[in-house]
């Protein structure tokens, strides 16, 4: 690839990554700003709810004192006992105190008017009570023929009772309205935060797709290069050199992109933690509020804070952790593509036996037996060959069929300068239409009941290509699989493929 084209290629890639990072940072700033505004709104609503609860408590106390005054007065009229005198005096004092406290807390003009009406009625009742205490004998004698249904003191008590009831109903409606506003603010907080986090994840996914597109395009170009090998030796060498330079640039680009992706990923993880801390504070507040005032409990609000929101944050955290694993995988592929191969003569049976021994416990846990047959020696890179066979055998163990005991065989053969190594199992098998799909990056086939990111076989094919070989599969559903690795018996250097 010419230098000018390569430089432009790298410049475009960097520009795209910086644009994606800029978008991610902007979304994060917007989300944090929205969270601060919403938390301020929640705090305001919380203070309003607390004031409403205080007013409700005072109104209840006022109503109680009203009834105590009426009961004490009636008792005194029936039997002038000092105990009734104390009851009326103490209840009247409490009534005056609650009136003063309530006046300081009321913000509604309608409620102030009602309180003023109560104050006026209580003043009239105080005159009646003072007259009763001033001449208790006369009051006692007058009460003997008194009809309490038309008594002014009783009528005043009834009027105060009705007004207090109206005030309590008004505060109850106000409490419902404030709770609804608080819930709306809470929902808005998590909706805005959730959308922002999802958008950030979308930006990261887009960036990963950009990296994969570069790698896929390079792999296709290298396959075409091998197809054109016959009769085009000089052209192939020239094109191979260009592809190697391009691959190095893309490897560097993939490393830079994957490394830079960590910055917004860390922001996502941090913001998710902030959301969770905010949820815990709200959870603690509601738990305390409901414990002190069980009649305020709202099951929908509690369910959202106690179950739905933790579950949503768990999903977000799981997604970001998966993204972190994908980034690590891309970095690993990039490092493998840059590693210099070191060919040596390999004792393949000994090498395979060591791999099988390292996987013995996993095979035993899966109820599988592994048999290593004769495998010809070859000259190649030890680390790459070990990685290929390790991955193929691990997959054979992982995807066994539960319908029968697992049997895995590794055998080898030779053909015109090539060593073939077959890994054969009697597992669940692979549908023919998925034979190519399983070798693609981040692609998997069949039932997704095993852990994995879809990188293993893609890495196997990339390593096989670097070693100058190929990897093929023969399989049908529920009929096991045969993976055939074909490598040159003498190492031939190839350009890196990822």
Image (cartoon, rainbow, N blue to C red):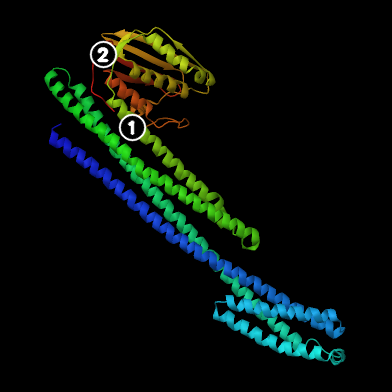
Compared with 321, 244 (above or below) is above
- Distance from disc 2 to disc 1, alpha carbons, whole Å, reads 26 Å
> Splitting the image into 4 quarters, where does residue 154 fall?
bottom right
Percent position (x, y) of residue 204?
34, 43
The secondary element bearing badge 1 is classed as helix
Q: Which of the pair 152/107 is nearer the observer?
A: 107
Q: Which mark is residue 331?
A: 1
For the residue carrying disc 2, how many other residues have a C-alpha within 10 Å: few (<14), some (14-19), or many (20+)? some
Residue 435 appearing in the image = no
> Splitting the image into 4 quarters, where does residue 253 fall?
top left
Percent position (x, y) of residue 278?
50, 53
Q: Nearer the viewer, mark 2 or mark 1?
A: 1
Compared with 394, 252 (above or below) is below
Q: Residue at x 26, y 13 (%)?
A: 491
Residue 195 appearing in the image = yes
What residue would you read off at disc 2?
Answer: 491
């Amino acid at each position: 690839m010419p230098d000018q084209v390569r430089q432009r290629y790298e410049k475009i890639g960097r520009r795209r990554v910086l644009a994606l990072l800029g978008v991610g940072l902007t979304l994060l700033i917007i989300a944090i700003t929205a969270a601060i505004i919403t938390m301020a709104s929640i705090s305001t609503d919380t203070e309003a709810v607390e004031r409403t609860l205080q007013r409700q408590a005072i109104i209840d106390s006022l109503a109680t004192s009203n009834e105590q005054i009426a009961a004490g007065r009636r008792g005194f009229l029936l039997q002038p006992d000092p105990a009734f005198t104390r009851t009326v005096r103490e209840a009247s004092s409490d009534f005056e105190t609650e009136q003063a406290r309530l006046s300081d807390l009321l913000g509604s003009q309608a409620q102030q008017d009602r309180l003023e009406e109560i104050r006026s009625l209580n003043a009239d009742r105080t005159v009646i009570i003072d007259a009763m205490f001033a001449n208790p004998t006369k009051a006692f004698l007058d009460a003997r023929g008194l009809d309490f249904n038309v008594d002014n003191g009783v009528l005043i008590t009834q009027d105060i009772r009705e007004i207090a009831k109206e005030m309590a109903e008004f505060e109850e409606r106000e409490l419902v309205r404030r709770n609804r506003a608080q819930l709306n603010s809470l929902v808005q907080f998590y909706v805005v935060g959730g959308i922002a986090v999802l958008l950030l994840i979308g930006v990261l996914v887009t960036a990963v797709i950009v990296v994969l597109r570069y790698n896929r395009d390079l792999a296709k170009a290298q396959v075409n290069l091998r197809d054109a090998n016959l009769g085009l030796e000089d052209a192939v060498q020239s094109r191979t050199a260009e592809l190697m330079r391009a691959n190095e640039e893309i490897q560097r680009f993939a490393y830079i992109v994957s490394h830079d992706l960590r910055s917004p990923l860390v922001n996502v993880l941090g913001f998710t933690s902030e959301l969770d801390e905010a949820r815990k504070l709200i959870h603690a507040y509601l738990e305390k509020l409901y414990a002190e005032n069980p009649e305020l409990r709202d099951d929908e609000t509690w369910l959202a804070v106690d179950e739905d929101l933790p579950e949503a944050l768990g999903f977000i955290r799981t997604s970001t952790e998966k993204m972190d694993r994908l980034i690590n995988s891309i970095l690993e592929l990039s490092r493998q593509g840059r590693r210099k191969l070191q060919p040596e003569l390999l004792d393949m049976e000994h090498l395979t036996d060591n791999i099988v021994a390292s996987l013995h416990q996993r095979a035993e846990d899966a109820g599988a037996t592994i048999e290593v047959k004769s495998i010809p020696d070859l000259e190649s890179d030890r680390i790459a060959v070990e990685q290929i066979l390790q991955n193929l055998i691990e997959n054979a163990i992982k995807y066994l069929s539960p319908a029968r005991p697992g049997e895995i065989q590794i055998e080898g053969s030779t053909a015109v300068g090539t060593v073939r190594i077959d890994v054969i199992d009697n597992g669940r098998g692979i549908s023919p239409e998925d034979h190519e799909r399983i070798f693609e990056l981040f692609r998997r086939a069949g039932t997704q009941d095993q852990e994995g990111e879809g990188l293993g076989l893609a890495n196997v094919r990339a390593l096989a290509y670097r070693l100058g070989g190929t990897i093929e599969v023969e399989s049908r559903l529920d009929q096991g699989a045969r993976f055939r690795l074909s490598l040159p018996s003498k190492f031939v250097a190839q350009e890196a493929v990822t």
